[in-house]
Amino acid sequence: MNAVTTAANGFRIDEPTRKAFGRVAVFMGGDSAERAVSLKSGQAVLEALLAAGVDAFAVDVRGCLLKTVENPEFDRVFIALHGRGGEDGTLQAILSQAGIPYTGSDVLASALAMDKLRTKYVFAGCGLPTPKFRTMASIDEADDILAELRVPLSVKPSREGSSIGIRKVSNRGELVEAYEDACSHDPLVLVEEWIEGPEFTVSVLQDRALPAIGLSTDHVFYDYDAKYLADDTRYQIPCGLAAADEQRLQQLAVDAFRVVGCRTWGRVDIMQDRNGGFWLLEVNTVPGMTDHSLVPMAARAAGISFEELVVRILKDTLESGHA
């Protein structure tokens, strides 16, 4: 794919590329707990695609996903749906069966990455570092968990995103309360040891790690408010690590991305302990693309504009096997 850049208009695709893309639907919204964020991401993606010269339009996906492929008036889909339905392999399976190319990871990788518990099984099975963990199926397991894992602990719904339903706990009462809250989002609840130390996120674009971002907040952790609402969240680019440590961090992110089977783009969240060790938390296959989002921020640090970023993500739908 060739593209042209003009000083007046920023990143623009050429006419052959525009024709190759055809009409592009940006799927956004959805019915998950991340609907509001998805609408912001989708709108930002749409505006960037239009600015780059792509024939794109918005689709606010509600209700039955099968309806999205009934008499489609588009040639390919840019998926900006976060959470269940859009990020968990369901939509990817429908589009694959319909033969419609779409951005991002395929059915298996999307379903796996959406499930934090099973992602951690893969990490552990492949020898990648991830905090010690177990499932919690009832409040009756609280004492066993506290005996098995070292407090503080992180309690989280296994199949939610944007840090929805996550709590840090230090005793039985907090664990029970956090479990009940997590169950309101997902009956599959993951409990893992809390890593005390700095948090990093590494975006991956076309199998290459972008500059790592160091995250710090006055909140207990980098929660939903810190991600999307607060103006005092601090982002470090460069991330503050020595060059060798950042390279090690980036390689770990790429390794995690590959073992889950992801493609084109995504983001890997990692903690560093007080001894300098890195610990994988999760892989995001449809990361946020809002004005607070981390993938666009990392891309800018690598000299990639938002318009170029979305076009590069979309470009991979032209490759064989991406439907």
Image (tube, helix red, strand yellow):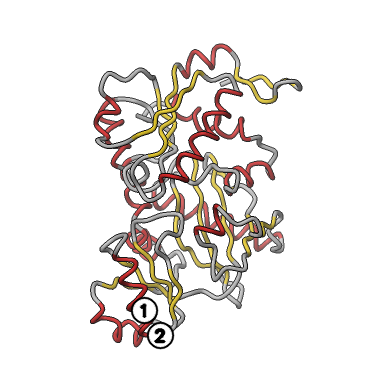
- Looking at this view, is 24 or 229 the one in front? 229
Q: Secondary structure at mark 2?
A: loop
- Looking at this view, is 297 or 133 the one in front? 297
Question: Measured along the vertical axis of the image, is residue 3 above or below residue 321?
Answer: above
Point 28% across, 41% down: residue: 90
**Residue topped by disc 2:** 171
**Which quadrant, please, contains the N terminus?**
top right
Q: Indicate the position of residue 199 as horizontal and vertical percent values.
A: 58, 65
- Quadrant hosting residue 231: bottom right
Point 34% across, 56% down: residue: 159
Question: Measured along the vertical axis of the image, is residue 216 above or below residue 108?
Answer: below
Point 69% across, 25% down: residue: 10
Number of other residues with Cα within 10 Å of mark 2, as a class: few under 14, some 14 to 19, many 20 or more: some
Q: Indicate the position of residue 121 as horizontal and vertical percent values.
A: 34, 63
Residue 314 got which mark?
none
Point 26% across, 78% down: residue: 139
Residue 175 got which mark?
1
Q: Indicate the position of residue 148 as horizontal and vertical percent values.
A: 34, 84
**Does residue 292 appear to the left or right of 256 in the view shown?**
right
Question: Measured along the vertical axis of the image, is residue 127 above or below residue 170?
Answer: above
Q: Indicate the position of residue 216 as horizontal and vertical percent values.
A: 63, 64
Mark 1 touching mark 2, by CB under 8 A?
yes
Marks 1 and 2 sit apart, C-alpha to C-alpha, by 6 Å
Q: Residue furthest right?
A: 7
**Which quadrant, please, contains the C terminus?**
top left
- Quadrant hosting residue 218: bottom right
Kind of residue sitting beneath label 1: Leu
Q: Secondary structure at mark 1?
A: helix
